[in-house]
Image (tube, helix red, strand yellow):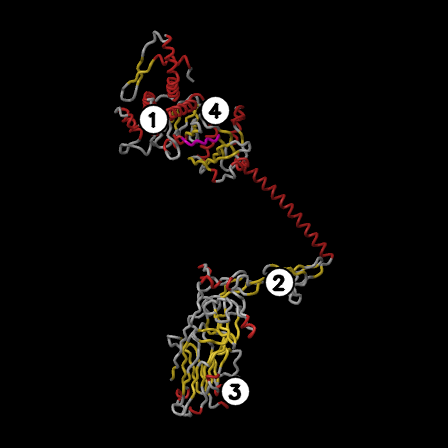
Amino acid sequence: MVVLPLFMLQVLWLAPPSSSNMLDPSVMQEDAPQCYDRTGIHIQYPFGVVGNDSVGLIPLPGFEIECSGSGPKLKLGSDRYRLLNLSLDHGYVRIVGHVIASRCPDNSSGHSLWPYHVPDLTDTPYTFSATRNQFTATGCDAMALIHGSGNRRVISGCVSFCADLKTVTPGVCSGVGCCQAPVPPGLKSFQLEFRSVRNLSGSTYESAKLPCSKAFIVDKAWYNFTRDDPRGNPDDEYRPVFLDWAIGNQKCQEVIRRNDTDYACKGNSHCIDPPDVAGYRCSCDPGYEGNPYSPGGCEDIDECAHPDTNPCVGKCTNTKGGYKCTCPRGTRGDGLKKGTGCKGIAPLDIALAGGAGLGILLLLGSSVLIWRKLKQRNVRKRKKKFFHQNRGLLLQQLVSSDETLVERMKIFTLEELEQATNKFDSARVVGKGGHGTVYKGILLDQRVVAIKKSKIANQIELDQFINEMVILSQINHRNVVKLFGCCLESEVPLLVYEFISGGTLFNHLHDSQDFAPLSLQDRLRIATEIASALSYLHSAASISIFHRDVKSSNILLNESYTVKVSDFGASRSIPPDRTCVTTTVQGTYGYLDPEYHQTGQLTEKSDVYSFGVILLELLTGKHPISYSRHKDGTLTLDFICSLRENHLYDILDPHIVGVGGGEEIETVATLTELCLRLKGEERPTMREVEQKFYTMRRFRRSDHDLDVLQNRGMTAGLPGKIPIKGNGSGSTRQYSLEKEFFLSLIEEPR
């Protein structure tokens, strides 16, 4: 057995200065005229000529071609192979190769070895083509085997045996004098082994008389076996070989996923994965032709330009990447030569087609009209259903019983409110409460309103929302948010209020980043207006109303800090003959009346307690729930302790301490303590609280006038001072009786 060594060739890359220049259109050319003129071979990018004939084309690594007097030659390492042809569309080059190896007998040893000449395609973009080449061996004593590089595993081979060359048949490679085997796919390098068939079989035939054995890879379409093939000098024999090529060593999916900047496929082209070859190639899209590796290289094919190749029978219109065939008037068909073509239409067919078309149009038109009518009918039915579901009949009864309500309440359509809120765009949301979402809207008359969309999860929440609408329809007070109207045509009812843009009292007291601190006088005025609104609800409205959820986040303020009490979803109206009602406990922790929480008995004193918590927030600037100096305590407990231990000023908001008004602060603190009594019967009514605040305001306005009257002797003979009950510790404060008398002259209470 004789194993011939493999002569490995190292490929010398002619690398460009940078990878970005490899695809730069400014340094590309589509042809090398020097080589083309002599050989007719189109050398196009990614191939390029290097050396003296180079005219600026920078080929991709491994695609370098030298142009000499004998024609273009492909560089493969340090060797040069004559280039016969190349194809961008099919991805191959055809070169002239030597006989790979030969084994010739001599008189002494019975054989002699000739080195084999084969390019090593490792680290090049090429592989031996498995579809266009054939591994061939000739001779009368040849077993030619191809081993994979490194692993010595046999991957292909064949056996050629004969008594002498007279017994062979020219043109036939069936194992007698000539044998053939397929080239393994993806083959880049290999090792070749020759074995003697006669030695293996024990034949005593003189091997020295046998012709040389040869093995080579050759273009299968070119090679035709003759009896003279084994006799020739191996060094003088050259045969064509196909090499397949590809770009890089990754498939299309990976290259596209990585979005490489050196992706080779340009406009109007796509990536293809060649079989049995690492890397990818490019191809122009259907309807385009040219060089897919060059920018603008794939150009539209004008299928209509040549009458002989025109695919249409009728009119041909070229389009980008395709064409369109149309039949002349009076004919029909697909207009293609290889299709149905264009055929004349009989008059009867025209009449039938016209009648059918008219019938279809009438059918479509009537279907659209019927669909619109049904849609409008369904919309009306849905609106009617929602109107009844949302207590629309109750609203009609209220309107019929109170003519003034017609002026205050408008029934809005759903379309009006959708237009006002841009179809309830989330960007229009200005607040979310326990009973719904509030949107800012602009009506057709340019009024800015707040539109509350109910958050309906069950019948109870729907009842609460309707309850708010009914209650607000009966209220008309400057410090209660005004209800402009409602919409009952949607699945959930919608209420339309006046828009209050100044935020809530909670924001002003607890959000120091966006709101400036309130002054003492603003806080006193706000407290007065809240008391006025609650007093109105309890005793001055047409029917007594208990709010049941009085808290700072339900107190709205406009730009001038005017109070607007809002959110009446939990409110209850009380018949005139009753002072309390038993209900499910509802409210907000921290503001909830302890007595109501324990007994379930809702009275007007429940709102008084909640108002007392708001007074506490105004005095301290602290949150009633999250703040406490005592373990397991509340702000209310801290306040009561500070008041009884005469440390009131330790808990007050620093913004109202030291700016005057000490007497007013202590009066409000005493009033707060009364409102926060655990027993409702010990708390004042909201009417009494309101009167107390108006009295304080009159004191401030009348000080100067009182001094004038005293100087004139108008207060002569009046008593000096009388005591009034103070805070919970039993201390008392003195108030000037002449002030009380004078105030009665200036302004009568509400």
How many marks can you see?
4
Confirm whether residue 176 shows in the render. Answer: no
Q: Nearer the viewer, mark 4 or mark 2?
A: 2
Q: CA distance from mark 3 to mark 1?
A: 121 Å
Q: Find disc 2 in the rendering and name its residue.
A: 302
Where residue 441 appears, as percent x and y from the top left, is 50, 35
> Which of the 4 image quadrants contains residue 660?
top left
Q: Say what amino acid the circle numbered 1 marks.
A: Ile
Q: CA distance from mark 1 to mark 2?
A: 88 Å
Q: Are marks 3 and 1 in contact (CB under 8 Å)?
A: no
Q: CA distance from mark 3 to mark 2?
A: 51 Å
Q: Find disc 3 in the rendering and name its residue.
A: 169
Q: Secondary structure at mark 1?
A: helix
Q: Secondary structure at mark 4?
A: loop
- The span shown in magenta is 498-504
Q: Say what amino acid the circle numbered 4 marks.
A: Asn
Q: Is residue 300 magenta?
A: no
